[in-house]
Amino acid sequence: MNNLSKPKALITGASSGLGKATALEFAKAGIDVALVGRSIDKLTSVASAAAATGVKAKAYELDLAKVEQVREQIQLIALDFGGIDILVNNAGIGYIGTLSETPLADWLMVINLNLTSVFQCIVGILPTMRSHGGTIINIASIAGKQPFPGWGAYSVSKAGLIALSKTVAAEERDRGIRVTAICPGAVDTELWDTLESNFDRKVMLTPQIVAQSVLHTALLPKSAVIDELTLMPSAGSL
């Protein structure tokens, strides 16, 4: 991490759910946070809560679905924030539907946000991160390791994210950059409000539990890395 100041983290999808929980866990640990998402009002609220712990926190409005803009915008955010030591790629979208019934537009929407935007965030941050090393944490899913029927595009996007994580790790390891893919089971977030599902949300992981694992991964000594972490609810198999 950058020795000139407190660690600085950039978190995507930080306005709610797991991203918000991660931002607040990082802030409590003394990590400055750059918060990225579509809703500037929600981001500003999270930034205020994070700043109340004594860290620097700033909100940046960015629609990651517009993948052609992401790389340049992430570079500008990193420059404005004074560098980034930790990148948490959390933003994503859920999607229910069999592959045979998935329209091409929906497929591209899921792949663009869950995989291509992460690729662009990574290549946007690498030039500055290479100068001092850093940590990249990608929030994948158990669905990327064990695809679920009816979750085709989502499962493929998360499997691709796991492969992307391993590839970046192999290419950037010699430059002092660590990459982790975290694969949680179902997490009880606002995502489920938009999906028609009969999963029991009471047995899901909470955003806070997953956020604590993200923080633990980020704070490992430089000499160690968690390549991949699977985190499941103890009460079920979601």
Image (cartoon, rainbow, N blue to C red):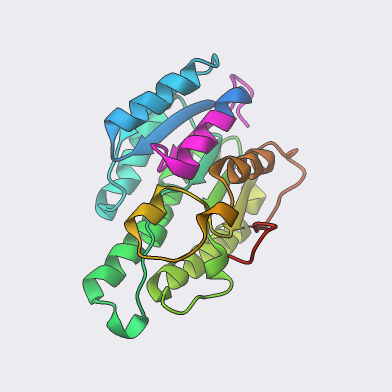
User: Considering depth in this image, is 27 or 232 the residue closer to the camera?
Assistant: 232
Judging depth in this view, the residue of 173 and 135 nearest the camera is: 135
Q: Does the magenta stretch include residue 169?
A: no
80 vs 121: above or below: above
Q: Give the range drawn in magenta.
A: 1-25
How many numbered marks appear? 0
The residue at 35%/31% (across/down) is 43
Q: Quadrant of the C terminus?
A: bottom right
Residue 207 falls left or right of residue 107:
right
Q: Which residue lies furthest to the bottom in this view?
A: 100
Say if the magenta span includes residue 5: yes
* Residue at x 33%, y 56% (from the top left corner): 194
Residue 73 to residue 27: above or below: below
Residue in the foreground of this view, choosing between 2 and 228: 228
Say whether residue 201 is visible. yes
User: Could you say where residue 133 lies in the image, as x and y percent from the top left?
Assistant: 61, 39
Q: Which of 189 and 131 is in front in this view?
A: 189
Q: Which residue is drawn at 26% across and 69% down?
A: 106
